[in-house]
Image: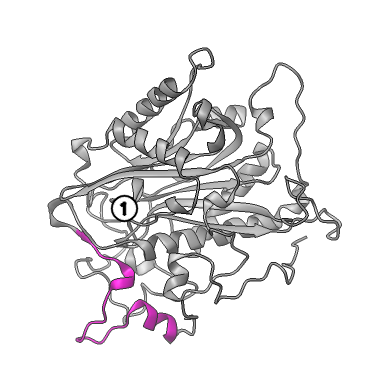
Amino acid sequence: MRTPLSKKQEVSAMSTVRGQARAVGIPFDGNAGPMNAIIDVDQVCVGHDQTSAGDTQTGVTAILPIGNDASDGIDTFVLAAFFCLNGNGEMTGTHLIEEMGFLEGPIVLTNTVSLGDVRSWVIKNAMATTPSEDFGLIVPVVAETDDSYLNNSLLFNVTQEMVDNAINKAIKNASPDNLQEGNVGGGTGMTCYSWKGGIGTASRQVIVYQSDNKTQIPNPNNDPTHPYFTVGVLVQANQGNYWDLVIRGVPMGQDPQFAPPPDTPDKPPGQGLPRRRTRKSSIIVVMATDTPLLPHQLKRLARRATHGIARTGTITDDDSGELFIAFTTVNHEVAKQADEVAQAGVIPNDSMDPLFEATVQATEEAILNALCAAKTVTGYQGHVAHAIKDAPPAATPPTLSLVEMLKKYNRYVGP
């Protein structure tokens, strides 16, 4: 049974919660966390490093599930699950996650061509930062989307220094100081719905009840002043065509009054353009929670990112990699594979609906945050990816800006 949000959970659309899309005036549902970011999940840390100059527009984003343990090395364990909506992409380490139910080490996002190099450098970073007596083999998770429209990726322009910097920034900056979005890290060269895209993040806090729908399940820290469980999402958004885009129900891509980017080709009949002749590509979704879940429940959570993406309009094109990973920061003692029997807390399956709803809401907002945070970029071969929020109305024919479109459909709430 779906648990209705309590009055305490309801959030006004005029909320002062941080968010690039909220700053534009886009309304959202649900109760966002204090930072409205994946780092609202305690212990999760994020870091970015990138280079943006001419034909080189690329970078690395690192997510450490248990960043406060990173002083002893990044070779940490959490329970996790993986889900593939469309497999035209790559995320390493997923076979181990499927087999064992845990994630070892960080999650790192980058471009398609650099994935193999980045994986090796994550292992080297773990070797350098873990006491030698504690280090064993590590099977890192590295995921990619294709930035070759803006970035000359065949130059292999991601470096080991960038990987180390992203991980080190994550260790040092598990705070609002590192809440960058848009043209940062792995999202530096990415586009989304033919506009400039990239990294976006959001979170939701929910109260979870037992199956009687009356008895509240306590939060992991047993803190009566903080009764919520948190779901945080980070995306590397690089998906969709401009005619697909929907923002909170507003059919941006289908309304002729909202002009597409100037250099966007007309929609072809039938299928889209062949691979690498278009800006559409893929999306990676990383979900974190402090809810006590087992791997099969985390997979159920990961699947729900599908609905958050769908709310923004994409149909998941043939050449789009839609790869999702979810982990919990509790129960990690179980994931360490101790020599004795370990006990894990777990909420009932019947109590997961609020978490499903939180995942959908946070995924949708993270994508729109990536769009609204992004800045216009001129990259490889002079290709331009335009920032959606800065697109001015054209005089002939008359077109509307993003804010004017929201007002036209009565969806604008003000920043």
Determine whether, in the image, residue 157 is placed left or right of residue 24: left
Please tell me whether residue 118 is drawn above or below residue 8 in the rendered image: above
Res. 25 visible in picture = yes
SS label for mark 1: loop
Question: Residue 101 at x, y = what percent?
Answer: 62, 31
| Quadrant position of residue 252 | bottom left
Please tell me whether residue 140 is drawn above or below residue 29 in the rendered image: above
Q: Which residue is drawn at 48% across and 30% down?
A: 93
Question: Residue 102 at x, y = what percent?
Answer: 59, 31
Q: Residue at x 28, y 56 (%)?
A: 279
| Quadrant position of residue 317 | bottom left
Magenta highlight on residue 226: no
Question: Residue 59 at x, y = what percent?
Answer: 31, 43
Question: Residue 174 at x, y = what percent?
Answer: 50, 45
Taking depth in this image into account, of 366 and 16 the one nearest to the observer is: 16
Q: Residue at x 47, y 41 (%)?
A: 63
Q: Which residue in the protein does label 1 denote?
A: 190
Tell me the magenta residue range.
384-407
Taking depth in this image into account, of 290 and 361 the one nearest to the observer is: 290
Q: How crowded is mark 1: few (under 14 residues within 10 Å), some or many (20 or more)?
A: many
Determine whether, in the image, residue 277 is placed left or right of residue 306: left
Taking depth in this image into account, of 106 and 177 the one nearest to the observer is: 177
Res. 90 visible in picture = no
Q: Residue at x 50, y 50 (%)?
A: 175
Outermost residue to the left: 381
| Quadrant position of residue 258 | bottom left
